[in-house]
Image (tube, helix red, strand yellow):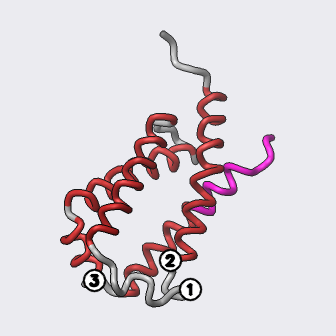
Amino acid sequence: MSAPPRTSDHASARRIAGLLGPTMSAVLISESPLVQPRLYDAQIPPVVYLSGVLLFLGGLAVLRAHHRWARDWTALVTLAGWAMLALGLVRMFAASQYNQAAAGTSATAFMILEGALLVVGLTLTYQGYRRER
């Protein structure tokens, strides 16, 4: 069986980016300490576990629909899928330890990470909704 044409790879990546980009952006902005400074003050392991299940499921869905490494923006879709899958597993199998590690991390480190992830989310949003050339 031959590989599907490159255009279908891009179409698949655009469909996923159109969902993943706005979702990442909205989640990151809404959970930002600038928007909700006390959101994670009372985080408990069962909630960390549940978020892990959702991340794992989302990452698996992304990778089942698009698992291609290319030298263009579509690699961000695959990378996001793998990151979601890995983070979901960590949160599922080590919810308490994840909670402790997150509590010991500085707010500056979180802001830097969230800023980088927001750039990825906005890039995916742009690629998912831009006009075809």
Vertical side of 111 occupied by 95: above or below: above
Tag shown at residue 103: 3
Above-or-below relation of 125 to 64: below
Horizontal and vertical percent position of residue 107:
38, 87
Q: Quadrant of residue 6?
A: top right
123 is within the stretch colored magenta: yes
**Which residue is denoted by mark 2 in the rendering?**
31
Residue placed under numbered mark 1 in the picture: 35
Judge left or right: residue 91 versus residue 19.
left
Look at the numbered discs 1 and 2 and tell me whether their residues touch, using CB distance below 8 Å: yes
Dot 1: element: loop
**Which comes before the other along the chain, label 2 or label 3?**
2
Q: Is residue 131 left or right of residue 62?
A: right
The answer to whether residue 128 is above or below residue 123 is above
**x 69%, y 56%: residue:** 126
User: Disc 2 to disc 3, how far (Cα)?
Assistant: 15 Å
